[in-house]
Image: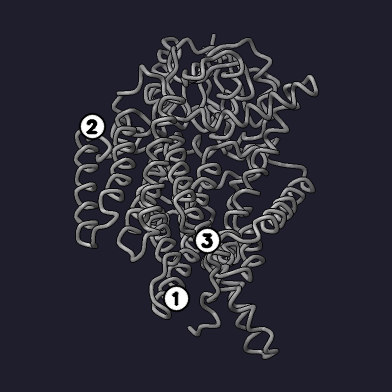
């Protein structure tokens, strides 16, 4: 590949033109918002299976309704008493602030909720686009502005992380990750300290970002091995910022009674100690070797790595084992093994091969571009750091496809640089240069790969007359809010329902449910599994034990079909066949609705 289609050579030494970049990013985000508005903000009325966002809304309501800041129990899901969610209040606070501000001005909490559901993701989309532009500028100069905005807006919009009602923590984590990268790309201890703060906050929000925090720490430490004094400032700033924010977020968000709990899916004192040790240790190593040679710095970093590793093993050994070890084996086989975002690449190839191109092609192209650039002019700070983050995110996405929430956005930066280089050659007014630019644009867009692969898959299925797996004959999957209007009119009770519908039911009705797609709700999920896959008599016994007053049945949901198919003689299979036991009283007006309701006699 020639230099005209790889990375541009111009690299600014400082963060220039940030006001123009912010204005352009805001306009691009506004365009994304207008597209949603023209279509009527469909995600406000139908979660489309985004359980985490509606569950987040329910959690914020509980907090505003009087539940303690430190109390993350979801009392209306699972067996009596509920269970503790593994989420962080860091995400709840800004969303709640928007809700309270608007409700105070309008006198309507409903208006506050709708505004927050639109404004919060939109603000995060502005931040994400701005940070992508800044990273592209640092890598390839000002010519990368337009490519970064176009590729970024199309990719982020296609991913759905910033659509209305996207209240889940993944979009905020991505923004902190991009901020961390941008601050590390430019030298300076203040920026490095900011990167350390971003890393710690991102980790406190969700432990799934640990690989990217580790890469950031490694990048900050590696700067000590480069000539010059910039590395000392970067390592010191990052270490102090990371240690300080790690300690502060622990005190501010984790209840003291849970500090020393042995948990790996949420932040705790055990992990906080490792973080503080790593941050302070990095700053101390930088200070102690400021006037020493390469060998002394290397030895110091090696000792620090050993100390942090040993401490992590001693304080949190369970975090080096299977993260879902506590999940009941039956739930792993029936539920976890069918969650698409938790599937590895090879399993995705078996289940949804048409999704491979949209999730993996652009990150690999981006890594190839970085390798070409480093071979052409030698390794540079920006290329090496971006490569480290891309490799980590792609490795995570190969293990679990949810890693693409980071690998796809990270890939935008080298891809924008490639398009910028191709655009710069169009001035030659040759057909070859124009075609090269068009080709660069096309291969940079995840949407192009997605559209192409799905078109091929659909054509092949049509040719071979293959039915789409999981087809439900057009029946509703019961994800629209309106589906639960009739259920909300019933007196509050416990509802037996599949886990896919537990979170939206919590958010739209006053009822409590047994099941929900959360690994900590082990007992509730197992109870529902046993009820639907057992005999009607066994289901009745479980419902009496759990004081279930209503049963909600959604014939069109894939989970319903899965239950019926796995246990053809079970309770769910009987419901699918309209064989209803006498102890269930149908609510007549729901019999022809997507969600059929029964009262337990």
Nearer the camera: disc 3 or disc 1: 1
User: Viewer-nearest of labels 2 and 3?
Assistant: 2
SS of the residue at dot 1?
helix
Q: Which quarter of the picture shows residue 133?
A: bottom right
Taking the spot 49% from the left edge, 16% from the top edge, the residue there is: 75
Crowd around label 1: few <14 · some 14–19 · many ≥20 (10 Å): many
In the rendered image, the vertical position of residue 179 relative to residue 261, given as above or below: below
Asked if labels 3 and 2 touch by Cβ distance under 8 angstroms, the answer is no
Question: Of the residues under marks 3 and 1, which one precedes in the sequence?
Answer: 3
Which residue is tagged 3?
358
Label 2 or label 3, whichever comes before in sequence order: 2
For the residue pair 512 and 590, the one nearer the viewer reads as 512
Left or right: 201 as drawn, with respect to 101: left
Please tell me whether mark 2 sits on a helix, a strand or a loop.
helix
Residue 99 vertical position relative to residue 600 in the rendered view, above or below = below
Residue 61 coordinates in the image, percent (x, y)? 61, 21
x, y percent for residue 545: 41, 10
Picture mark count: 3
Q: How is the image coloured?
A: one colour
Q: Is residue 458 visible?
A: no
Q: Could you say which disc has been placed on residue 315 in the image?
A: 2
Q: Which residue is mark 1?
A: 373
Q: Position of residue 99 (x, y in %)?
A: 68, 27
Q: Quadrant of the C terminus?
A: top right
Would residue 135 be visible to someone looking at this image?
Answer: yes
What's the CA distance linking mark 2 and mark 3? 39 Å
């Amino acid at each position: 590949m020639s230099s005209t289609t790889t990375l541009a050579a111009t690299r600014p030494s400082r963060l220039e033109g940030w006001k123009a970049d912010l204005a352009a990013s805001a306009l691009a985000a506004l365009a994304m918002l207008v597209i949603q508005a023209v279509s009527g903000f469909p995600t406000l009325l139908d979660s489309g299976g985004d359980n985490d966002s509606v569950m987040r809304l329910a959690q914020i309501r509980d907090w505003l309704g009087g539940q303690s800041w430190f109390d993350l129990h979801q009392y209306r899901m699972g067996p009596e008493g509920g269970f503790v969610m593994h989420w962080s209040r860091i995400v709840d606070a800004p969303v709640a602030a928007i809700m309270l501000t608007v409700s105070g001005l309008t006198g309507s909490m409903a208006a506050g909720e709708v505004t927050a559901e639109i404004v919060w993701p939109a603000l995060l989309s502005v931040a994400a686009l701005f940070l992508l532009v800044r990273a592209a500028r640092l890598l390839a100069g000002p010519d990368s502005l337009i490519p970064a905005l176009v590729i970024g807006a199309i990719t982020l919009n296609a991913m759905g992380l910033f659509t209305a009602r996207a209240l889940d923590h993944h979009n905020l984590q991505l923004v902190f990750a991009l901020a961390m990268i941008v601050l590390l790309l430019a030298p300076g201890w203040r920026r490095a300290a900011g990167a350390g703060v971003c890393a710690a906050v991102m980790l406190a929000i969700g432990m799934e970002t640990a690989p990217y925090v580790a890469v950031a720490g490694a990048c900050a430490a590696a700067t000590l091995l480069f000539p010059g004094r910039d590395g000392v400032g970067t390592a010191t700033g990052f270490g102090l910022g990371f240690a300080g924010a790690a300690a502060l977020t622990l005190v501010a968000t984790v209840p003291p009674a849970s500090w020393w709990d042995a948990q790996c899916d949420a932040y705790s004192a055990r992990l906080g100690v490792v973080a503080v040790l790593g941050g302070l240790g990095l700053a101390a190593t930088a200070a102690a070797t400021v006037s020493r040679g390469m060998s002394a710095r290397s030895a110091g970093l090696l000792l620090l790595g050993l100390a942090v590793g040993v401490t992590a093993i001693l304080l949190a050994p369970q975090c080096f084992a299977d993260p879902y070890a506590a999940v009941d084996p039956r739930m792993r086989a029936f539920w976890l093994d069918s969650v698409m975002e938790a599937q590895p690449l090879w399993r995705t190839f078996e289940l949804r091969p048409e999704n491979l191109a949209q999730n993996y092609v652009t990150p690999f192209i981006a890594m190839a571009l970085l390798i070409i650039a480093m071979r052409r002019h030698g390794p540079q700070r920006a290329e090496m750091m971006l490569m480290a983050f891309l490799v980590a995110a792609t490795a995570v996405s190969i293990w679990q496809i949810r890693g693409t929430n980071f690998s796809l956005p990270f890939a935008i930066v080298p891809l924008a640089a490639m398009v910028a280089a191709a655009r710069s050659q169009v001035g030659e007014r040759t057909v070859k240069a124009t075609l090269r630019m068009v080709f660069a644009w096309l291969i940079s867009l995840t949407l192009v790969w997605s559209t192409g692969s799905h078109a091929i898959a659909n054509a092949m299925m049509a040719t071979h007359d293959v039915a789409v797996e999981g087809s439900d004959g057009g029946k509703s999957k019961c994800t629209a809010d309106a589906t639960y209007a009739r259920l909300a009119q019933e007196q509050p009770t416990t509802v037996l329902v599949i886990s896919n519908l537990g979170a939206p039911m919590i958010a739209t009705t006053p009822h409590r449910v047994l099941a929900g797609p959360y690994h900590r709700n082990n007992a509730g999920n197992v109870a529902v599994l046993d009820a639907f896959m057992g005999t009607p008599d066994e289901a009745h016994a479980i419902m009496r034990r759990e004081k279930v007053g209503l049963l909600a049945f959604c014939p069109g949901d894939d989970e319903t079909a899965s239950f019926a198919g796995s246990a053809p003689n079970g309770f769910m299979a009987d419901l699918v066949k309209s064989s209803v036991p006498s102890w269930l009283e149908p609510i007549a007006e729901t019999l022809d609705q997507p969600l059929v309701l029964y009262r337990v006699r």
